[in-house]
Amino acid sequence: MNIVLLSGGSGKRLWPLSNDIRSKQFIKFFKQEDGSYESMVQRVYRQIKKVDSDATVTIATSKTQISAIHNQLGDEVGISVEPCRRDTFPAIALATCYLADVMKVDPEESVVVCPVDPYVDDAYFEALKGLSDQADKGEANLVLMGIEPTYPSEKYGYIIPESAEQTASVKTFKEKPTAAVAEEYIAQGALWNGGVFVYKLKYVIEIAHKLIDFTDYYDLFAKYDSLQKISFDYAVVEKEDKIQVQRFSGEWKDLGTWNTLTEAMEESVIGNGTMSEDCSNVHIVNEMDVPVLAMGLHDVVISASPEGILVSDKEQSSYIKPFVDNFEQQIMFAEKSWGSFKVMDVEDKSMTIKVTLNEGHSMNYHSHKHRDEVWVVISGEGKTIVDGMEQNVSAGDVITMSAGCRHTITAISELKLIEVQLGDAISVEDKQKFELEL
């Protein structure tokens, strides 16, 4: 099975845990049997491999998410990088060409495109295999998943099939309705649109060539920033006559808001949190090293991270985005391909950061024009290279780098250090990378 996971957006509705480079799908909410936590993308990837160990998984995403993907899933997963955001049709077209031209997948093979963040059980991925098998038959150019609705939701689009059979032709599509109109749709046998598209590679490649002037994946990638922003639904689905839908009645939740997310959480407190016995339907998610105490609260979510603190009625938490859009703040936490960092303190001319470097990983060999840096190793063992000079380091060692000095560090074991940046103009743009000649 070929699967493309659409991983876009910053997920600001889960602020303060999500930000411009840490999308909701990378936040570790879900407890595993060993007591550790996994993220939405880790959960979905694990479920895919459980159902089909040979599945080819490609994630269509922006370049800001690449480091987090490698950090959480390793280097084996395929990544189709969008140079900029151009909505779902360009993203799917690029990923389809990536599979054909880079991964050399046969254009006659089917591909399943689905969101990266549904909360589902294994039956969902078994259903995706069924969709792929149906697309292989060639009865339709597109096969969609229709979710059996459990209530008249205003949050989803609707698919109205021609019949009540498990696999049916699509009669029409409906945009997100009011609750009253949704009831009318459901009475007509309508299904929620699960955002899943299945087709043979050659089908979308042919449509892409009709709508875009390009030769292959590499040419499309180079022209990507000039493409029209348009959704796959508008560009392809609504213009296709040969289209089928398969019903799915298993567990399926869209965890796009704090309200829906807390419904899927197995425990009411993640991190350092305590609540009094008279609290009801309260959830605490705390990434800080300080305790959070809730008393006498009902239907409330509390979330704390280096980015900020949210205290909200659960229903009202769905309307968080306009407020967060007005915030201008330093990114305080991020996962990188080599590890992670957390900003501890920001002053006018200094910044203090705690860095965790994963075993066997290195930072880029780089320099800064406008700032000095100091590293204090607090645990683990590693090797620094400063202007070409190598040195083994361990807990207690201090390394200083003046502006313009080229430097990197490699973790022999997991390595933690405090980085202090000093300068009049501290900026993420102040970084020049170099090839390291060994």
Image (cartoon, helix red, strand yellow):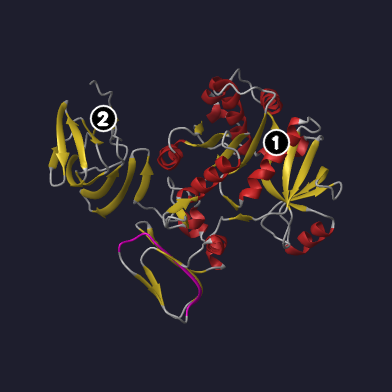
The secondary structure type at the circle numbered 2 is loop
Judged by its main secondary structure, the magenta piece is strand
CA neighbours of label 1 inside 10 A, class few (<14), some (14 to 19), many (20+): many
The kind of residue tagged 2 is: Tyr
The kind of residue tagged 1 is: Ser
Residue 146 percent location from the top left of the image: 73, 48
User: Which of the 4 quarters of the picture holds residue 434?
Assistant: top left
Residue 29 percent location from the top left of the image: 47, 56
Residue lying at 50% horizontally and 49% vertically, measured from the top left: 25
Highlighted range, magenta? 279-289
The residue closer to the viewer here, 255 or 249, is: 249
Residue 190 percent location from the top left of the image: 79, 53
The residue closer to the viewer here, 413 or 315, is: 413
Residue labelled with disc 2: 365
Residue labelled with disc 1: 132
**Quarter of the C terminus within the rendering:** top left
Q: Is residue 145 above or below residue 290?
A: above
Image position of 300 (left or right of 353) = right
